[in-house]
Image (tube, rainbow, N blue to C red):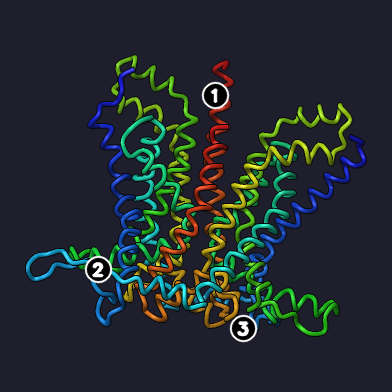
Amino acid sequence: MKPIGRPGRWLIILPPLIFLVIFFLIPFVFAFKISFAETATRVPPFTDVISFTRDHHLQLTLTLGNYRYLLTDEVYGVAYLYSLRTAFFSTLICLLLGYPMAYAIARSPRSTQGLLLLIIMLPFWTSFLLRVYALEGIIRDNGFLNTALLHLGLISHPLRIMRTSLAVYLGIIYSYLPFMVLPLFATLEKLDATLLEAAADLGSTPRRAFLDITLPLSLPGVIAGSMLVFIPAVGEFVIPSLLGGPNQLMIGRVLWDEFFGNHDWPVASAVAIAFLLLLVGPIAIYQYYNVRQLEA
Amino acid sequence: MTDNTERRSSAALLSVLFFGIALLYLPILVLIGYSFNASPLVNVWGGFSTAWYGQLLHNRQLLQAALLSLEVAVAASTGAVVLGTLAAIALVRFARFPGRLLLTGMVNAPLVMPEIITGITQLLLFVSMMQLFSWPHRGFTTIVLSHVTFCTAYVTITVQSRLAAADRSLEEAAMDLGASPARAFLEITLPIIAPAIVSSWLLSFTLSLDDLVISSFVAGPGASTLPMVIYSKVKLGVSPDINALASLIVCAVGVCIIGASYLMTRTDRRRALEAQLAGR
């Protein structure tokens, strides 16, 4: 077989490579640089980090003030911890709900699996913003849920769900559940059914067989699904902004306010860089399991 | 395993599945129901009406934003399909090249990167580029560039898996018969991965149409996409015409996605059938 010529190869490799370096990678370099700048009343609203003096010497004007500010102003710590906690518990609930769903799909006849997966995936592709808005229609004080419960006489006062942490949890679970089901299904579907039969033949109860065989073998799916829910949930902006109240301060919202409210670009950059560094760990774990799963 | 416990656990699993599906669909169905409510009050049913749909046609702000969003989505998904397909070919066909690891990382990272971080960093890039090169002006161009970035990731993943599954022996046979590698690829492999390309275009289109966070950062003061207008309206409170608009978008996107997945499965089935007929 003739290999594709070298110059031809680079015609294929270079366009996406260069585009992504410029528009995905280099932006982080600029954010890193600007996180050491100071705010200034001009356009763009920050001082130059790198400049040339009159005698053409390169001059670096760095300030660590933004990072110090993150450590001293407790809003950031509180928001970061609240984001982590919210993302963690929503991921856990997604897992508890998504696992049986994925298991049921994996055990259903092959002909209906495709349809069920499409049903699960359809909401994921359907406008995220509009789905959060649709959920608001359910949990509002005069929304569908309260109207139905009042009508049935189960409650005498509308339940207050909007602007609470419960609303944020519901929003994240509702929005990210498909992310959990898909990778779980992918691992559960590959599971060798003869292993379970063997276990049953050897006298193992279904519960034992599930705990000893199914659960450990589906662990890559559990981890991939959890990462797919956890990472975007930590950085979530739309859900706490539309469903949460002033106390549901997640880091994405703080970033947004810092940028659009306070116009403090350097602090926003510092928050973004710090947040990114604190996320690199989970992403690395996710990639590790992702690669291992692909190799399996 | 006794049949009884087996049956009971199956029933439990299925009920969780249906509960989950109901959870996913109930809000959307209720929203569509609201959109036909004649009363502007959300908790009062005032009879069936399509008035809110009619009102949409007279809302210039919404129509303008919708037009901008559609233009952005067409441009971004087309650009992303070109770059993403090239990236997929590079990653599947070229086992070793300098920058392979970098490319792999850059097509996977946007999938897990919080949008808000991508948005801020890309805005900082565009602002710095403006300082250095007086280009690009914030608006249509910057929105398209940032949408191409994250859509490329989705296209690459979709096309990559299809390309990896494609049988290379046909292409090799074509080359043995004297076709150039480029011609063999275009005539043999491209038709095989075409459904993946079409469906990833549709997926990119819906992703771009839906994006709020990244667009808000990079759009600049002059341009507003549809999600940006919807967000600011929703933030102020409920508006019945948004219910109508949301129902329209949800249905349109639903049709696109079902179409995309139908395309993928139909060609899969046809190929399986052909393979069977060929006696493999």
Note whether residue B246 is visible.
no
Q: Which residue is mark 3?
A: B40
Image quarter of residue B63: bottom left
Which image quarter is the N terminus of chain A in?
top left
> What's the CA distance linking mark 2 and mark 1?
63 Å
User: Which mark lies nearer to you, 2 or 3?
Assistant: 2
Q: Position of residue B21 (x, y in %)?
A: 70, 56
Q: Is residue B232 visible?
A: yes
Tell which subunit mark 1 falls on.
Answer: B
The x and y percentages for residue B121 are 36, 63
Is A32 left, or right, of A85 in this rendering? left
The residues bearing labels 3 and 1 have C-alpha atoms spaced at a distance of 56 Å
Chain letter of the residue beneath label 2 in the structure image: A
Which is nearer the N-term, disc 3 or disc 1? 3
Amino acid residing under circle 3: Pro
Q: Amino acid at mark 1?
A: Glu
Task: Residue A104: give x, y in percent of width and height.
Answer: 75, 45
Residue type pointed to by label 2: Val
Look at the picture and state if A136 lies above or below B6: below
The residue singled out by tag 2 in the image is: A49
Q: Nearer the viewer, residue A31 or A129?
A: A31
**Which element carries disc 3, helix, strand or loop?**
loop
Position in image of residue B233 (x %, y %)? 50, 79
